[in-house]
Image (cartoon, coloured by chain):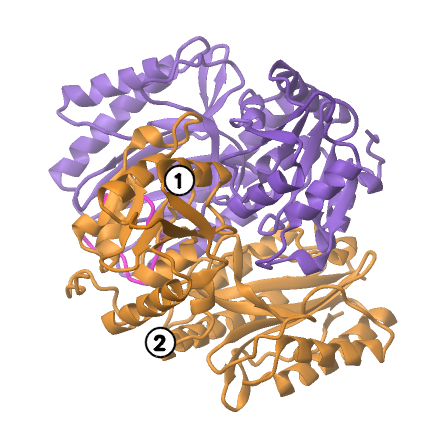
Chain colours: A orange, B purple
Amino acid sequence: MQQPSPSTARPLGPTPAEYEQRLLRVRQEMARRSMATLVVTDPANLYYLTGYNAWSFYTPQCLVVPAEGDPVLFAREMDAAGARSTTYLSGDLVEGYPERLVHRPDVHPFAWIAERIRERGLVDHAGGSTVGIEGDSQFFSARGYLALRSGLPDAALEDSRELVNWVRVVKSDYELAQMRIAGTIAQRAMEVALEAVAVGRRQCDAVADILAAQATGTTDHGGDYTAIVPMLPTGDGAGTPHLTWTDDVFRDGEATTIEIAGAYRRYHAPIARTIMLGDPPERLASTAAVARDGMAAVLAELRPGRTPQEIHALWDAVIRARGLSKASRIGYSIGVGYPPDWGERTISLRSGESFPLAAGMCFHVILGMWMDGWGYELSEPVVITADGAERLTNLTQDLTIRK
Amino acid sequence: MQQPSPSTARPLGPTPAEYEQRLLRVRQEMARRSMATLVVTDPANLYYLTGYNAWSFYTPQCLVVPAEGDPVLFAREMDAAGARSTTYLSGDLVEGYPERLVHRPDVHPFAWIAERIRERGLVDHAGGSTVGIEGDSQFFSARGYLALRSGLPDAALEDSRELVNWVRVVKSDYELAQMRIAGTIAQRAMEVALEAVAVGRRQCDAVADILAAQATGTTDHGGDYTAIVPMLPTGDGAGTPHLTWTDDVFRDGEATTIEIAGAYRRYHAPIARTIMLGDPPERLASTAAVARDGMAAVLAELRPGRTPQEIHALWDAVIRARGLSKASRIGYSIGVGYPPDWGERTISLRSGESFPLAAGMCFHVILGMWMDGWGYELSEPVVITADGAERLTNLTQDLTIRK
């Protein structure tokens, strides 16, 4: 692999040694599974392994990682130049497929890519070869999969089961620094959000403030785009978690749950809070108290060696003692994120998961209670250190009340 | 299908008759292809057919449309309530799959959905049946496809080749009204953008202004989130189209291409302009003149009966006469959009495409010239009417120069 030259290296980005280390860990896992080649399609994984970062993932692209030799990045022709100028990959390790293949029902870029994979010898046919694909990666479509399979008739395609995502779970010092910066942006954005929600104001105008705060970031660090837009279901809508905004106004007597993130160089620190306009009903106030106690119980024990199911059980005990229950997970691994999700699709904090937690992992601990016609959310982005959970923000964990 | 009740109908949304008409057109095409069932996964198609609109597409969801009888919407359990409250589908026509299926390598929601499809009799096994899938839909993963195929062993899965997307190509009067509103938001956002780019200002701060303008929209109509974030490659980066912003500052002597959209109720009007800080180099000024002439040639002939290849040839003649060439398409069909793309993945304005244009189609005509280390963009969102192209904005088409 070519070393980055001074003029093309991303300033303050990971060192060449860190990229080499990432690739090595991916290859170690490939070797363990006897995988000759891995076709990486998740934009977050592409960024993690090469630094390639552009809004080009709406057309097919992938990094082909052979067990030995240089990885090759394939992208649409008009995006290949951007890939060459923003990654450490030298010119011939980036290939652009022809424009005529874009958005056609009868031909697919992955057929072209498969041909180039064969021509470049990126897949070893000696004795049959296993080619890993990212089965549940966003932006790797069924048609793309079928085209790749047809184009590599001698290869056995095998789901990598989030191989690269699992390599990403434990963050390097460089990555933790990015996460902490993302936390400062999240903190600022949530402070703005809690000021922006007011009786009689349009939801879209509050969102305008939030989006501006997310992009502005801080004086030292500008914000990146977030993988999910601000979600702030209000009133009846707060009973369901993923509704986006409208141009209706906020009303007195209604609560709004706000879930947003701060993002820096694609690293995400998501955070959720709830604001009540007027006097909170008893049910909301008591749920807020339960969530705060549950969060304290979870954060106190989120440390290396604990398992997700143990953490979930602590939460479950707190809410069951108050007569509440919650079916969904209470958190998930975070780090690099691209739309439509800032989660890493690896570890979830829920019952039945026993993968031990380790220092350097990052989680979005989200205690969302979605009831019939109302809801409450409290969340924290955290890093697991040898000493336990380190919060990335320091906002109060209480229900915000504005009268 | 249940009629919308007054309390759940989206205000000013499509009428029940319009939803019925949309479904009818989908079923007519299904019948033509002997398709017993269609599994719709593209969020834009889900919204078009049901009104369902939430940031829930990062976990599997689909609308199963049988040739006869009610369509059924499948989503994650925590999202099913939102689907019931925002669509015309009655309670039992929305099913939520269990939380335990989310983000696991060993089980997949589409296995559960396949089982429910069989149990509900949504696929006709008499004499074998063809089940259409959306092969290149975003958010329908290879793993989801394989789970659906395994779960419907008696069905023949067939790529629908953007069946619903093609139904969407010609817009109704209701839809054209949304597009025109989106145009007013796009206009305002671009006016803000051209003011926001200034020497010494951080790119992220300009983006903050743009994002806020996109969400604020106009006094009458709040903006929705756009399917693509603002793209404003600057300086050397302007030679590649899809780079997003950084916290570097804009510099004197550099040009910035700005590509953004106005969005209203998921309908998108994208627009691109270029701004020069300082005196434009001759190559930029002359490219701007060529693009303006090319746009005039295209818009003059964009009318019912013309074909995409004819339109492309007009453009090509203009730029070839000036010694320029462009490999990529000069436009594509637009309408409802979800991340990561505001295009409909149907008609592209390029050579080799002969599907005749018709009144009610909408296009983003984008003349992007990406050179080695610099670039120029000029685009217009337009509606094709019986009389020709109607622009959705009325901004000047010249290069903006700020000294």
Q: Is residue B335 above or below residue A69?
A: above
* Residue segment shown in magenta: B238-255
Q: Residue at x 33, y 19 (%)?
A: B298
Q: Residue at x 84, y 36 (%)?
A: B6
The answer to which image quadrant residue A198 occupies is: bottom right
Label ID, residue A148: 1
Density class for disc 2 (Cα within 10 Å; few <14, some 14-19, many ≥20) is few
The quarter of the picture where the N terminus of chain B appears is top right
Q: Nearer the viewer, residue B172 or A177?
A: A177
Q: Is residue A301 above or below residue B53?
A: below
**Mark closer to the observer (2, 1):** 1
Name the kind of residue labelled 1 in the image: Leu
Q: Nearer the viewer, residue B244 or A139?
A: A139
Residue A378 relative to residue B399: left or right:
right
Residue B380 is situated, as x and y percent measured from the top left of the image, at: 39, 29
The answer to which image quadrant residue A310 occupies is: bottom right
Name the kind of residue labelled 2 in the image: Tyr
Residue A228 relative to residue B354: left or right:
right
Label ID, residue B135: none
Density class for disc 1 (Cα within 10 Å; few <14, some 14-19, many ≥20) is many
Q: Are marks 2 and 1 on the same chain?
A: yes
Q: Is residue B251 above or below residue B50?
A: below
The residue under label 2 is A174
Query: What is the chain letter for disc 2?
Result: A
Residue B188 relative to residue B233: left or right:
right
Residue A314 is situated, as x and y percent measured from the top left of the image, at: 72, 81
| Direction top: furthest residue | B305
Q: Mark 2 or mark 1: which comes first in sequence? A: 1
The reply to whether residue B129 is visible in this rendering is yes
Residue A163 is situated, as x and y percent measured from the top left of the image, at: 45, 62
